[in-house]
Each structure stands twice: as structure tokens, then as C-alpha cells.
Image (tube, rainbow, N blue to C red):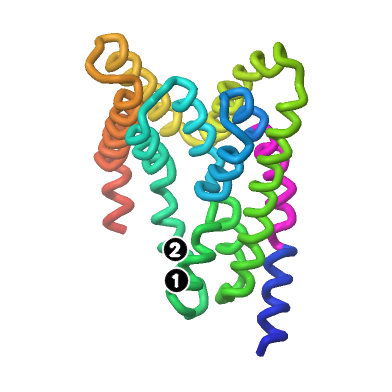
Amino acid sequence: MAIGRVSEFKKGLQGGISIAIGYMPIALTFGLIAKTTGLTLGETLMMSLLVFAGAAQYISLSLLAQGIGMVEIVLTTFIVNIRHFLMSASLNEKAEDDTPGKRMLYSFGITDETFSVAATQPGTVSTGYMFGLTLISYSSWVVFSGVGFLIGAGLPKTLQESMSIALYAMFIGLLVPSMKKSIKVVYLAALAASFNTVFTLAGLMSTGWAIVSATLLSAIIVEAVEAMKPGKKVDDRE
């Protein structure tokens, strides 16, 4: 029985190698930008250890750089990662029965990439496989976040300061592929940007709350419009 668990763990490690390699440049960039944003090495590593969410961590850096409050940062990252409820619920149906403690432990490592790999596995996904898959992905993200920070610390001061533009370039890099796949993402991004601009320039709320409100409002509007489409109703009847 123990041999079988080890075998499943190794399969998970093998399945996560490509994810770990893919995380390397993103984590390096995160660590580099975290250094230029003003975080310490310990804070950078703790964020990767406790949050482990690429887009959310980049957004957090941006909000921290703007001096946004803790509550707004938590709410914004929660909204960004709310899709994890759906991914976890879906994966729960595919995972083997095990103790709640073990499921909670490996569920922390569920990301878009680990979910995709696990969801495409034939049959039931074992606990050992999930631990191997999430461990190698998680380790890559944390380790290379630290490596990126150390690389940033070794750069000339002028270059460190100029690296702040990389944060915005990363956001564009995250957004454009999604916009190419779905026109809904284009509408969502345009609406959120418009609402945020209005809320901020009109002085209706602080920058942090403007981001939270704009994100929620645009998501609600886009989904409401999507639900009211005639084709959507026909599909539901089928």
C-alpha cells in the first residue's frame, strides 16, 4: 500500500515538472518586482508561501506600491481568485476519498495549471498524485520568487527603479491572451477600467475601493448581459 502511494506521488511530481518550469520566469519576475516595490526578502517569500497565486500577487504589489489599505487588497485578491471555488468543487468530485485534513492541505496548491493537469487525468485522482503535483509547482514558485528578489538586489539602483514598468507589462501579458480567447474579457476589462476611472477622478471613493467596486460592478454587468442573451436561454432549455 505504501509503495503504491509513493508511486502515485512520483507520478504527481512528473506531471508537475512542466508547470514548475513554466513558473520559473514568472516567479523570477515577481521576486524582481517585489524588490523594486520595496518588499524585503522575507516578505517576498512569505507572500509566495502564504498566497501562492501569481496574478493576485502581482496585483497586490501594484496596490502596495500605491499605498492601498489592507482590506482593499484582501478583497481585490479574493475577487481575482474566486474562481478557485469552482475549480476545487470540480476537482473534489474527481479526487479519491480521503480525510478532510489531507484534502485541505493539497487544495492549497490548486492553481489554474495544477487544476488543468489533474482534471485531465483519466479516472480518479489519488491523494499522493495531488501532493506530488502541487508540491513541485509550489516549491518552484516559492524558490524562484526568492531567486528573483536576490537578482533584483544585485542590479544597479537605476535599473531597479526602472523595473517598475515591468509590473504593468506583466498585467498586459496576463490580460491579452484572455482577451484573444473571449470577447467577454474585453468588455470586462473595458468596463472595469471605465468604472475605476470615473470613481477615482470623481473622488467618489479611494483608489483601493474604486478598484474593488469597479471589478465587482463590471463582472456583475457582463454576466447579467451574458445571461440575458437569447441563445443562452435556448441552450439552457436543451
Disc ID at residue 127: none
| 182, above or below 53, in the image | above
Write the residue at 39% across / 25% down: 68
Residue 82 lies, with reference to residue 151, above or below; the image says below
Q: Callout 2, which amino acid?
A: Ser
**Disc 1 to disc 2: CB gap under 8 Å:** yes
All told, the count of numbered labels is 2
User: Would you name the residue on which mark 1 appears?
Assistant: 93
Q: Secondary structure at mark 2?
A: helix
Name the image quarter holding the C terminus.
Answer: bottom left
**Amino acid type, label 1:** Glu
Badge 1: few (under 14), some or many (20 or more) residues near its Cα, within 10 Å?
few
Helix, strand or loop at disc 1? Answer: helix
Q: CA distance from mark 1 to mark 2?
A: 6 Å
- Left-right relation of 5 to 180: right
Which stretch is magenta? 15-29
Kindly identify which residue carries mark 2: 90
Residue drawn 71% across the image and 35% down it: 148
Residue 43 horizontal/vertical position (percent): 56, 38
What is the x, y in percent for residue 147?
73, 39
Place residue 29 in its image quadrant: top right
46 magenta-colored: no
Residue drawn at point x = 44 percent, y = 71 percent: 93
